[in-house]
Image (cartoon, rainbow, N blue to C red):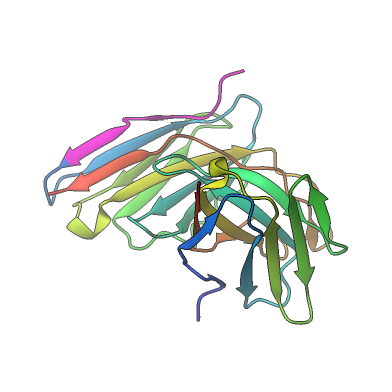
Amino acid sequence: GAGVSQSPSNKVTEKGKDVELRCDPISGHTALYWYRQRLGQGLEFLIYFQGNSAPDKSGLPSDRFSAERTGESVSTLTIQRTQQEDSAVYLCASSNPGETSGSVSSYNEQFFGPGTRLTVL
Amino acid sequence: RKEVEQDPGPFNVPEGATVAFNCTYSNSASQSFFWYRQDCRKEPKLLMSVYSSGNEDGRFTAQLNRASQYISLLIRDSKLSDSATYLCVVKTSGGFKTIFGAGTRLFVKA
């Protein structure tokens, strides 16, 4: 079946403009993650969605960043008033959430999209 | 201190060599551990989970040391195709937030 898709694949914008990035998860995956990866660095967790639960927004770096998800489908990550420091690859991943028993939760593999390469001039 | 730390490398090894990567994590309550592989300009993909008893998948062996809070990945008989960045991943207790290390770059040369 189809994997995770993201659009656009590349985005060049001017400082101060708003951008919107889109992620289409694998059908049936209820969990969705956004990460940021700066050049030569690791993945930085941004936000996590699970079904209809309140998202975990603990990784969003500032109030210029926001994300939405409609049900268990498409998600959009919006960056307002972009800054040069926002330049990075933005990766989306989806998974089945695993099961939670008390404080222990299992983990299912995260499948990543190809990312959106954002360049802020 | 970062939650997950890895030696960035790069590790340059000849084909057939054995190479080991270590990763340390700061949260003693971390529950689950993984190694992902990321090829240049590609998305990460799961390489293997890391179990408390250690586990092996072909040429790859993963170990977990909870007392010292580190995990390791051993690659035997390195192939050119093993050249990639290897990401250590830790899942926090409760919830589903996952923390990725910055990765260790491996170059395998003929």
In the image: residue B21, left or right of residue B40: right
In the image: residue A115, left or right of residue A93: left
Question: Residue B3 lies in what quarter of the image?
Answer: bottom right
Residue B103 in sight here:
no
In the image: residue B53, left or right of residue A44: right
Magenta stretch in the rendered image: A1-12
Question: Among all residues in the image, which is located at the extreme right?
Answer: B53
Please tell me which residue lies in front, A66 or A109: A109
Question: Residue A41 lies in what quarter of the image?
Answer: bottom left
Instruction: State the residue at coordinates (39%, 42%).
Output: B41
Place of residue B73 in the rendered image (x, y in percent of width and height, measured from the top left): 68, 60
Instruction: State the residue at coordinates (67%, 60%).
Output: B91
Instruction: State the residue at coordinates (64%, 32%).
Output: A29
* Magenta-span inclusion, residue A10: yes
Please tell me which residue lies in front, B3 or B54: B54
Place of residue A47 in the rendered image (x, y in percent of width and height, measured from the top left): 49, 52
B78 in relation to B29, above or below: above
Q: How many marks?
A: 0
Place of residue A54 in the rendered image (x, y in percent of width and height, measured from the top left): 57, 50
Residue B29 in sight here:
yes
Instruction: State the residue at coordinates (25%, 52%).
Output: A87
Place of residue A59 in the rendered image (x, y in percent of width and height, measured from the top left): 46, 61
Question: Among all residues in the image, which is located at the extreme front?
Answer: B110
* Magenta-span inclusion, residue B74: no
In the image: residue B62, left or right of residue B53: left
